[in-house]
């Protein structure tokens, strides 16, 4: 949906890849500024190649996608690895603030 609207993807895993550190627990403005074609915070569109080997489930999800109007996603603040999906930036901002607060409480800089 973001690509169709001409928006940058701004996906944290691509910033981690550009930084060369998938172990990062918190992406900061330092990573989002890294000059790499893989950094979707800086560059429009998809990265020039994959950032990891996708699972079979991920490939199947892409091939059998469900249409929706979500524009944003954010990790859940319970660190479950699950995501919140949002249609508006305002809704996304609420989830992003919750996640940032959870990182703060956990002492993750």
Image (cartoon, rainbow, N blue to C red):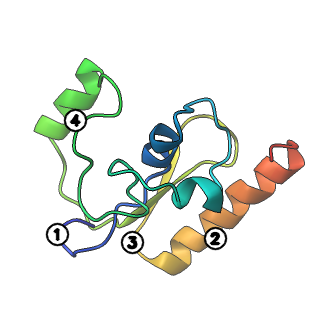
Which residue is labeled 4 in the image? Answer: 61
Which residue is at the far front?
A: 35
Q: Residues within 10 Å of mark 4 (few under 14, many from 20)?
A: few
Which of marks 2 and 4 precedes in the sequence? 4
**1 vs 3, front mark:** 1
Q: Is residue 67 above or below residue 60?
A: below
Label 3 vs 2, first from the N-terminus: 3
Residue name at image x 18 percent, y 57 percent: 67
Badge 1 or badge 3: first in the primary sequence: 1
Locate the N terminus and report the quarter of the image it occupies.
Answer: bottom left
Foreground label between 1 and 4: 1
Q: CA distance from mark 3 to mark 2?
A: 12 Å
**Label 1 belongs to which residue?**
4
Give the answer, above or below, for where 109 lies relative to 89: above
Residue 32 image point, x, y percent: 53, 58
Measuring from the top left, give residue 17's x and y in whole percent.
46, 38
Above-or-below relation of 75 to 10: above
Which residue sits at x=33%, y=63%? Answer: 43
43 vs 19, left or right, is left
Question: At numbered mark 4, what does the secondary structure look like: helix, strand or loop?
Answer: helix
The secondary structure type at the circle numbered 1 is loop
Specify the label residue 94 is tagged with.
Answer: 2
Judging by the rendered image, the residue that carries numbered circle 3 is 87
């Amino acid at each position: 949906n973001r690509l169709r609207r001409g928006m940058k993807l701004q996906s944290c895993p691509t910033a981690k890849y550009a930084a060369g550190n998938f172990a990062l627990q918190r992406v900061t403005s330092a990573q989002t500024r890294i000059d790499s074609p893989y950094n979707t915070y800086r560059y429009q569109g998809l990265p020039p190649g994959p950032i990891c080997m996708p699972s079979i489930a991920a490939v199947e999800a892409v091939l059998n996608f469900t249409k929706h109007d979500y524009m944003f996603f954010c990790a859940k603040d319970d660190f479950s690895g699950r995501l919140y999906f949002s249609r508006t930036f305002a809704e996304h901002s609420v989830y992003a603030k919750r996640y940032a607060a959870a990182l703060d409480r956990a002492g993750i800089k």
